[in-house]
Image: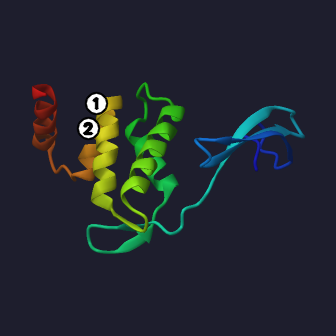
Amino acid sequence: MRCPHCGSEEDRVVDSRAAQDGRAVRRRRQCLKCEDRFTTYEYVENTSLTVMKGDNRREPFDRQKLLTGIKLACNKRPVSAKKCESLVDEIEARISEISRNEVESSFIGKLVMEKLKGTDEIAYVRFASVYRRFQDKEEFLEEIKRMLEK
């Protein structure tokens, strides 16, 4: 693990505990070079979950890809990294409830939009513009009008 402060790869684990209802391990680490402390999370990889894309391709579910998309939508918005992680946890939990092996990417996209709409409307519109492939400003305006009507 690389220290986020100095870049050293030498550290020691100070504390370990279960996190996120047992789906992750939280480790508190101390850099042996600069002595700063930092936290890492280790997740159990669910390799059996497959995502079916719109063009019928299949690929393994990638938590990091989901988190990256949410963080991009929330960029420069008042949404913390911790909240983004929490949204991913909620989405993963919902996927686990309905599917054991395969889930459609459209279902994941709708879950993300639902969660972002309740978190930050600008992040929601950003994500929706990519997810729904808005082609021009009129589609943005239509989406904003729908939000204002509700």
Q: Residue furthest front?
A: 97
Residue at the (85%, 44%) spot, across then down: 11
**SS of the residue under disc 2:** helix
Q: What percent of the width, then of the height, locates residue 106?
A: 27, 58
Q: Amino acid at mark 1?
A: Glu
Location of the C terminus (image quadrant): top left
Residue at the (42%, 70%) spot, across then down: 59
The image's mark for residue 59 is none
Residue at the (90%, 40%) spot, across then down: 32
In the shown orientation, is residue 75 left or right of residue 22? left
Q: Residue furthest right?
A: 32
Q: What percent of the width, then of the height, locates residue 5?
A: 75, 36
In the shown orientation, is residue 131 left or right of residue 81? left
Q: Give the alpha-carbon distance from disc 2 to disc 1, as whole Å.
A: 6 Å
Q: Pointer 2: what residue?
A: 125
The image shows residue 93, relative to residue 102, as above or below, that is above
The quarter of the displayed image where residue 142 is located: top left
Q: Pointer 1: what residue?
A: 121
Q: What percent of the width, then of the height, locates residue 60?
A: 47, 68
Q: Amino acid at mark 2?
A: Val
Do residues under tags 2 and 1 come within 8 Å of each other at their CB atoms? yes
